[in-house]
């Protein structure tokens, strides 16, 4: 199948085109890549937008292609012209993991570069699967970021997230609800063969309710009526399905011991609020609003590190005596986020304390206050200035 015949997702439904930060063409010059990202983040459109139009695409979402290659994986070779095709895309590779053996062979024998896209890691993580032994690197595609949206509206983004087809939608609530039902409630359950669907549904609501908070496996297990082991497996399933990610505690402080538990964030604020069934307009004074803003900044930093190919540690810090900083990057940048519209000195307490715990090049307070200032060697900036500086490579380098 040629690229011009490749079926695209609903993000092509109108004329709006977002210029993505991830540069596939440059990445693929010298190496094969896995490209992971949740469904509808725009992988198919990015491929069409950036790669040559005659690029060979093998789409495992097409039932005839899927059934043929599932039965006879070696027949993938019949679809490739080894003299002409120097780059081949296999979409949703996790649906037939054994194809990775064929990919391995063709990389070695014919020096073809592959782009292997996927929206789930569960099947690929099996110990029996061939992950190409370093012959393919990993890249990720996330929801649209601040830097990729020309007319960025913070309130819309916090409530509805950055999935391209949602930002275009005239019926955002209904489309998000359908996405969550089809992707989270159905596809993930089917993929994992979850028997107790009602328990998983209740877990999903709890995971959303406590998103950005430190995970208390015992309390969640007790509320739902399952074991802690089951709760941990559910969280692992969300991560394997690319629905969320964990931040682990920074534990390199000089004096104060930090907690051992991690935090969990969903990959998109809109998906989070669809699960929570939040109102159309968020209460800016609510705890939910504050946690959503924290998740938004976490998403931006995570995407930045990935797109810039920076293999840096990304943590949070909370001491046993409850001193806290939201984010620690590469053990040298501490970032605290607040939804306050006015600066107050007590907002700096965590950043001051972490300055005693390590050698930090930068400590930054991010708020809604438009006035920038430096207090006790801590930079206090508005969220917009912070994100402009982040994507201009002035925060993390």
Image: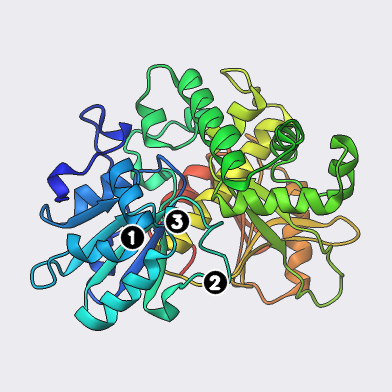
What residue lies at 16% left-to-right and 70% top-to-bottom?
86
Q: Is residue 349 left or right of residue 335?
A: right
Residue appearing at x 20%, y 79% in the figure = 110
Q: Position of residue 336 (x, y in %)?
A: 66, 53
Residue named by callout 3? 94
Q: The residue tagged with tag 3: helix, strand or loop?
A: helix
Secondary structure under tag 1 reads: loop
How dense is the environment of label 1, judged by Cα within 10 Å: few (below 14), some, or many (20 and up)? few
Quadrant of the snapshot with the C terminus: bottom left
Direction bottom: furthest residue: 108
Question: Would you place residue 28 above or below residue 121 in this image?
Answer: below
Q: Where 56 falls versus 172 (above or below)?
A: below
Question: Between tags 1 and 2, which lies in front?
Answer: 1
Query: Do the numbered discs 2 and 3 sit on residues whose CB atoms are within 8 Å?
Result: no
Label 3 Cα neighbours within 10 Å, binned few <14 / some 14-19 / many ≥20: many
**Quadrant of residue 276 in the image?**
top right
- In front of the other: 311 or 275: 275
Residue 293 spot, x, y in % from top left: 60, 39
The percent coordinates of residue 1 (x first, y second) are: 17, 50
Residue 62 shows up from this direction: no
Residue 186 versus residue 300 in the image, above or below: above
For residue 98, side relative to residue 12 (left or right): right
Q: Which residue is mark 1?
A: 72
The first of marks 2 and 3 along the sequence is 3
Q: Which residue is mark 2?
A: 128
Residue at figure coordinates x 34%, y 76% from the top left: 104
* Label 2, residues with CA under 10 Å away: few <14, some 14-19, many ≥20: few
């Amino acid at each position: 199948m040629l690229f011009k015949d490749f079926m695209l997702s609903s993000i092509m439904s109108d004329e709006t085109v977002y210029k993505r930060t991830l540069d596939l063409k440059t990445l693929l010059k010298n190496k094969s890549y896995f490209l992971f990202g949740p469904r509808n983040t725009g992988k198919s459109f990015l491929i069409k937008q950036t790669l040559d139009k005659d690029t060979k695409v093998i789409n495992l979402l097409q039932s005839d292609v899927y059934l043929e290659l599932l039965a006879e994986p070696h027949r993938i070779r019949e679809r490739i012209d080894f003299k002409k095709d120097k780059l081949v895309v296999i979409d949703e590779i996790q649906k037939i993991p054994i194809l990775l053996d064929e990919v391995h062979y063709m990389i070695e024998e014919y020096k073809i570069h592959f782009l292997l896209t996927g929206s789930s890691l569960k099947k690929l993580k099996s110990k029996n699967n061939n992950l190409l032994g370093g012959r393919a690197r990993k890249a990720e595609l996330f929801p649209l970021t601040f830097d990729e949206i020309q007319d960025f509206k913070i309130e819309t983004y916090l409530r509805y997230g950055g999935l391209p087809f949602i930002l275009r939608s005239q019926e955002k609530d209904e489309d998000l609800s359908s996405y969550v039902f089809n992707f989270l409630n159905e596809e993930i359950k089917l993929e994992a063969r979850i028997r107790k669907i009602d328990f998983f549904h209740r877990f999903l609501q709890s995971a959303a309710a406590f998103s950005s908070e430190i995970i208390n496996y015992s309390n969640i297990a007790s509320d739902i009526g399952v074991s802690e082991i089951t709760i941990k497996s559910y969280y692992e399933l969300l991560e394997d399905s690319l629905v969320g990610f964990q931040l682990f505690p920074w534990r390199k402080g000089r004096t104060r011991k930090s907690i051992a538990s991690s935090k969990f964030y969903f990959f998109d604020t809109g998906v989070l609020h669809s699960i929570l069934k939040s109102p159309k307009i968020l209460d800016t004074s609510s705890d939910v609003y504050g946690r959503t803003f924290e998740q938004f900044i976490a998403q931006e930093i995570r995407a930045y590190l990935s797109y810039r190919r920076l293999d840096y540690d990304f943590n949070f810090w909370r001491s046993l005596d409850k001193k806290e900083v939201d984010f620690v990057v590469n053990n040298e940048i501490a970032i605290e986020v607040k939804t306050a519209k006015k600066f107050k000195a007590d907002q700096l307490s965590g950043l001051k304390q972490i300055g005693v715990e390590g050698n930090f090049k930068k400590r930054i307070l991010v708020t809604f206050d438009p006035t920038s200032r430096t207090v006790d060697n801590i930079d206090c900036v508005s969220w917009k200035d912070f994100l402009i500086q982040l994507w201009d490579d002035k925060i993390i380098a």
